[in-house]
Amino acid sequence: SQQNNGNNKMVYSKRRKKPTLSDCESKLAKLKAENELLKRHLNHMSTKALRFDREKTLASERIKSYLEKDASTTEMKRGVQDFTDMYSDYGRRRQHELNFHLEQLQRLVNPTNFTKMGLWTLAQGSANPKHNPIAGML
């Protein structure tokens, strides 16, 4: 604390604690890893449409060849089942994409420490803080 020249009021400086080098390095490493993940996902998505069309054509031709060579019923069922698993709404690939996007949304929706502190501060003025729905988030 410091004294102001003209009056007897104390002047306090509001310095923020500086992050340590190790904190900055760990945050940088985390951000670089996330950046690489997003780059891989973007690259994957940009080539996905072309690859999807090519694989779909190959699967259709495989099923057509089963019809032409009078394949057994089990071979036909397996070919159709593989095609269905791959491209249906509940297929493996769509589930993988859905999980990726849900994880990203969950990460973005989680409140930061600053938001938590602000919500906690707002809840302090209420008569009964235990019945505050925001308190459950903290």
Image: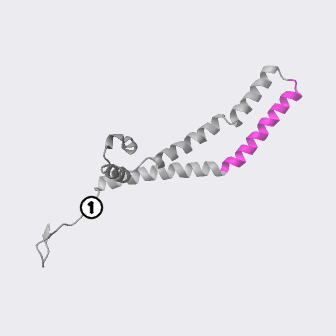
Quarter of the image for residue 12 reads: bottom left
Quarter in which the N terminus is drawn: bottom left
The residue under the point 60% across, 42% down is 97
Name the residue: 30% across, 52% down.
22
Q: Is residue 60 left or right of residue 86?
A: right
The correct choice, above or below, for 105 with respect to 78 in the image is below
* Residue beneath the point at 51% across and 48% down: 37
Q: Is residue 112 magenta?
A: no
Q: Give residue 7's quadrant in the image.
A: bottom left
- The verdict on residue 63 being magenta is yes
Q: Which residues are magenta?
A: 47-70
User: Does residue 137 appear anywhere in the picture?
Assistant: no
Q: Residue furthest front?
A: 127
Q: Residue at x 50, y 51 (%)?
A: 36
Viewed as shown, does residue 10 lie left or right of 137? Answer: left
Foreground residue, 124 or 11? 124
| Image x and y of residue 41, in percent | 57, 48
Residue toward you, 9 or 52: 9
| Residue carrying label 1 | 16
